[in-house]
Amino acid sequence: MAETTFFPRRLILGAAVISGVLLALAVHMLGARYGLDLGGLWRSDTHEFMPAGAAIAWWLIATVGFSGGYFTATLMQSAASGQIPQRMRQFLIAVGVLLLAGAGQAASAPSPIPTVSGVLAGLAALCLGAVMAFCGAHFALRRS
């Protein structure tokens, strides 16, 4: 019987953070295409306290970053020991490729957001995704 091999914890943490950040940025790009704009937080032309689209985008990016980091760390831990079925592995790869392809298609079109606001929103999404992906991966690694 083959012995169980484990990935180093730092490798799992790094891969989970990168995966969570990429998923959070993909959701940010897709959300901006559909009107969920983080840049609405810095606009002064609205009379509302905070636009609902900006709040939804903020929570959506944070949720996807956290869950992406958490599930990637969990899957990497169980993948080393061969506990993930082949069909599940193929399904997860297909979902990841389709999500990133959709984000690439959305990023290649002209942006509906003004340039400075778009850059600030992209940096905010990057930082939020990184922090939440790290928290999700760290939580998954401490749980095991």
Image: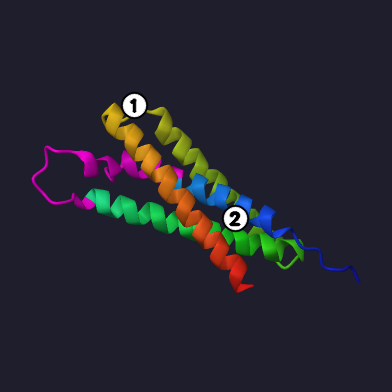
Range of residues picked out in magenta = 25-52
Q: Which residue is mark 1?
A: 110
**43 sits left or right of 27 in the view:** left
Q: Nearer the viewer, residue 66 or 134?
A: 134
Q: Position of residue 36 (x, y in %)?
A: 28, 46
- Tell me what residue is drawn at x 54 percent, y 57 percent: 69
Is residue 67 placed above or below 110 in the rendered structure? below
Q: Is residue 14 left or right of residue 67?
A: right
Residue pictured at 36% horizontal, 55% vertical = 60
The residue positioned farthest toward the right in the image shown:
1
**Dot 1: what SS?**
loop
Q: Residue at x 65, y 54 (%)?
A: 90
Residues packed near mark 2 inside 10 Å, few (<14), some (14 to 19) or many (20 plus): few
Separation of marks 2 and 1 at Cα, in angstroms? 30 Å
Q: Is residue 10 above or below residue 37?
A: below
Q: Earlier in the sequence, mark 2 or mark 1?
A: 2
Q: The residue under label 2 is which amino acid type?
A: Leu
Q: Vertically, is 92 above or below 77?
A: above
Q: Residue furthest left?
A: 47
One can see residue 84 in this view:
no
Query: Which quarter of the rendering shows the N terminus?
Result: bottom right
Q: Please report the residue visible at 71 percent of the width from the left and 62 percent of the height from the top.
A: 79
Label 1 is placed on what type of residue? Answer: Pro
Q: Are marks 2 and 1 in contact (CB under 8 Å)?
A: no
- In magenta stretch: residue 120: no
**Label ID, residue 92:** 2
Q: Is residue 45 magenta?
A: yes
